[in-house]
Amino acid sequence: MNIEEFDYDLPESLIAQTPLKDRDHSRLLVMDRETGEMKHLHFKDIIEYLDLVIH
């Protein structure tokens, strides 16, 4: 792996300057490891991807 693979253009306008009022509305990008499919979701949906057992 080359460090150059991590060089990319990121416009400052795409970098959050302040947190969202409702933080669970922040964006979440999920990639299916088997298919490579990318899904654009909201952070509130992260529970669908966590395998938790609470006793």
Image (cartoon, helix red, strand yellow):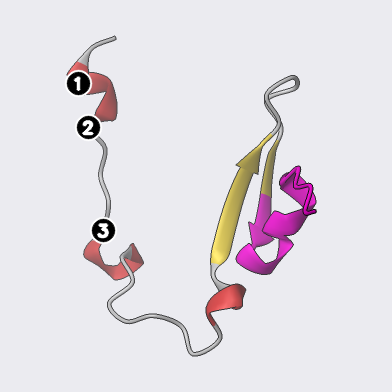
Q: CA distance from mark 1 to mark 3?
A: 18 Å
Give the residue displayed 56% in from the left and 64% down from the top.
27
Task: Examine the structure image and report whether residue 52 is included in the region drawn in magenta.
Answer: yes
**Of helix, strand and loop, which one carries label 1?**
helix
Quadrant of the drawing holding the N terminus: top left
**Mark 1 or mark 3, earlier in chain:** 1
Residue kind at label 3, given as amino acid type: Pro
| Residue to which mark 2 is pinned | 7
**Residue 25, x across and y down, in percent:** 60, 76
- Secondary structure of the residue carrying numbered label 2: loop
Q: Magenta segment, which residues?
A: 40-55
Vertical arrangement, residue 43 with respect to residue 22, above or below: above
Check residue 11 in the rendering and tell me which mark sits there, or answer none.
3
Q: Which residue is mark 1?
A: 4
Q: Residue at x 77, y 54 (%)?
A: 54
Image vertical order of residue 31 relative to residue 19, above or below = above
- The disc labelled 1 sits on which kind of residue? Glu
Q: Residue at x 27, y 77 (%)?
A: 17
Q: Secondary structure at mark 3?
A: loop
Q: Amino acid at mark 2?
A: Asp
